[in-house]
Image (cartoon, rainbow, N blue to C red):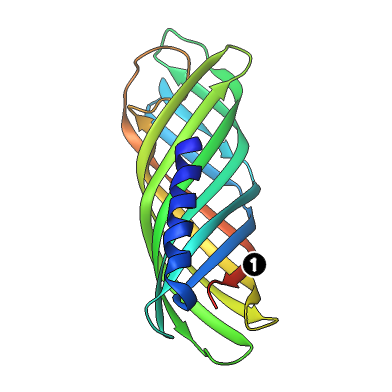
């Protein structure tokens, strides 16, 4: 987390030096439930729900022109994961509620339209990484993983003044191979599922945007 913060501070310093072409954005959004089901066979499976919650973060955006921009984003989410799992015919079905932290580091390329007025629409695609940390509090066990992530968004900036605006945004983020394989959510040890499940995260929210420089 400290390294991510230092990265954003460094990027903020650089974008401030770029003057009026840079923007500083802050985000808050509600993310919806995402169910998953990882199955090898009747005796080896894992399923549950990544529960809904609040996601927050920030981004540094550079405007190449009135129609295009690139933004480096950091988004964080803490939630719980009630799950059921069974590994092998000689084991019992177990239930556990895990604590999950997601940290997305994404680079987004966006197209802007309707600029010059009070409302400025935008849409774009993004790619980056998802850093996951999962804990089983009752057992004192934890697991961490890094996965490739991608997503897309559409939104509107509503400008209150020449320097400050409100962001309204819908976004979807996904991470491949986020459950199963080398990232197992259990305390049994090095168990490898041959089936993987992709994480999908849909959110609605917004935030504030500030134009930097003079």
| Residue 183 falls left or right of residue 97 | left
Q: Is residue 1 visible?
A: no
Which residue shows up at 57% across the image and 66% down it?
A: 170
* Mark 1 residue crowding within 10 angstroms, few (<14) / some (14–19) / many (20+): some
Which residue shows up at 39% across the image and 12% down it?
A: 189
**Quadrant where the C terminus is found in the figure:** bottom right
Tell me residue 210's x, y (percent). 60, 71
Q: Residue furthest right?
A: 160
Residue situated in front as seen by the camera: 191 or 10 = 10
Q: Name the residue under label 1.
A: 208
Q: In this view, does 87 lie above or below 209?
A: above
Element on which disc 1 rests: strand
Q: Is residue 6 visible?
A: yes
Residue situated in front as seen by the camera: 50 or 121 = 121
Number of numbered callouts drawn = 1
Image quadrant of residue 58? bottom right
Image quadrant of residue 111? bottom left
| Residue 171 falls left or right of residue 55 | left
Which residue shows up at 63% across the image and 14% down it?
A: 138
Tell me residue 94's x, y (percent). 56, 17
Q: Residue furthest top?
A: 90
Tell me residue 63's x, y (percent). 42, 76
Image quadrant of residue 45? top left
Q: In this view, does 153 lie above or below 35?
A: below
Which residue shows up at 54% across the image and 43% down it?
A: 35
Residue situated in front as seen by the camera: 107 or 193 = 107
Residue situated in front as seen by the camera: 23 or 109 = 23
| Residue 154 falls left or right of residue 177 | right
Tell me residue 132's x, y (percent). 46, 35
């Amino acid at each position: 987390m400290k390294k991510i913060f230092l990265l954003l501070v460094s990027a903020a310093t650089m974008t401030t030096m770029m003057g009026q072409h840079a923007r500083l954005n802050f985000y808050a959004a509600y993310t919806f439930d995402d169910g998953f089901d990882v199955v090898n066979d009747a005796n080896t499976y894992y399923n549950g729900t990544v529960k809904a919650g609040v996601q927050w973060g920030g981004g540094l955006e550079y405007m190449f022109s009135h129609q295009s921009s690139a933004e480096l984003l950091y988004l964080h989410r803490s939630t719980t994961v009630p799950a059921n799992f069974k590994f092998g015919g000689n084991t019992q079905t177990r239930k556990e509620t895990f604590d999950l932290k997601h940290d997305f580091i994404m680079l987004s390329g966006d197209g802007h339209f309707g600029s010059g007025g009070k409302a400025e629409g935008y849409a774009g695609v993004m790619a980056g990484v998802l850093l996951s940390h999962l804990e089983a509090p009752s057992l004192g066990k934890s697991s961490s993983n890094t996965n490739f992530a991608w997503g897309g968004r559409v939104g509107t900036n509503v400008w209150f003044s020449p320097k400050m605006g409100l962001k309204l945004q819908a976004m979807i983020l996904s991470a491949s191979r986020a459950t199963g394989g080398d990232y197992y959510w259990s305390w049994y040890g090095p168990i490898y599922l041959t089936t993987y499940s992709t994480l999908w995260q849909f959110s609605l929210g917004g935030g504030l945007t500030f134009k930097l420089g003079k």
